[in-house]
Structures are given as structure tokens and as C-alpha cells.
Image (cartoon, rainbow, N blue to C red):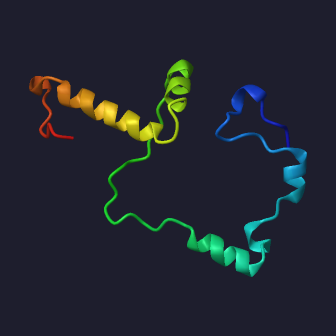
Amino acid sequence: MPKPSKKRTDRDNPEWTEKEFARAVPFSELPAKVRKVLEKRKRGPQKAPTKVAISIRLSKDVVDTLRSTGEGWQGRVDDALRSWINLQPAERGRANRSV
């Protein structure tokens, strides 16, 4: 399997080393006690989903700046977009102005 380009990896998801690959095992081969603990850590379904997963292309410098603000940067982007939407004139045809 070819290794990914260094240009395509990022600090949030670093490329595994050969040592890490050698130690890796499928989840099903972990000891039952470990699997049980990890299965409990899974997040359950949302009672009322409030967010939608999307894919968006942004400039690298914008993403780098946003990520540099630390944990929670995606929520801050959501807040900034909501503020921008609420500042737009009502005549743009939006039925529900308070998002």
C-alpha cells in the first residue's frame, strides 16, 4: 500500500509510523475486557440532532487560522456563520430569521 503524500497529511490526523502499524490489531482481536470498555465509550444517538455534517472547501490559510484557535473551532465557525446570517437583510427571502 503506498504511503500518503506528506502534503496530504495533517496534524489532526498524523500518518502512522511503521511501529504503529506493526502493533495494530483489529478491534475484534482486542481482549474482551478492553472491547467492553471501548464500546461503552461510544456516543449514543442524538435525541434531537441539531447539526448536519457537511463538506466544505476553504482556503488553507483560513483553515490553519481557525484550527490555531484550539479546541471548539468548528463550533465557533458555526456561531460566526449564524451571526452573519442574522445580519443579512430580511428581503433575502428567509422565512425563519432566527437561526
Q: Position of residue 35 (x, y in %)?
A: 69, 74
Indicate whether 17 appears above or below 30. above
The residue under the point 12% across, 38% down is 95
Q: Which residue is most to the front?
A: 70
Q: Position of residue 15 (x, y in %)?
A: 77, 40
Q: Which residue is most to the left?
A: 91
Figure disc tally? 0
Q: Of 85 and 93, which appears nearest the observer?
A: 85
Which corner quadrant holds the N terminus? Answer: top right
Q: Of 83 and 71, which appears nearest the observer?
A: 71
The residue under the point 15% across, 33% down is 94
Drawn side of residue 1 relative to residue 81, left or right: right
The residue under the point 49% across, 28% down is 66
Which corner quadrant holds the C terminus? Answer: top left
Q: Position of residue 36 (x, y in %)?
A: 65, 78
Indicate whether 12 appears above or below 20. above
Drawn side of residue 98 relative to residue 71, left or right: left
Drawn side of residue 8 relative to residue 64, left or right: right
When asked about the image quadrant of residue 89, the answer is top left
Drawn side of residue 98 relative to residue 56, left or right: left
Indicate whether 26 appears above or below 51. below
Q: Position of residue 39 (x, y in %)?
A: 61, 72
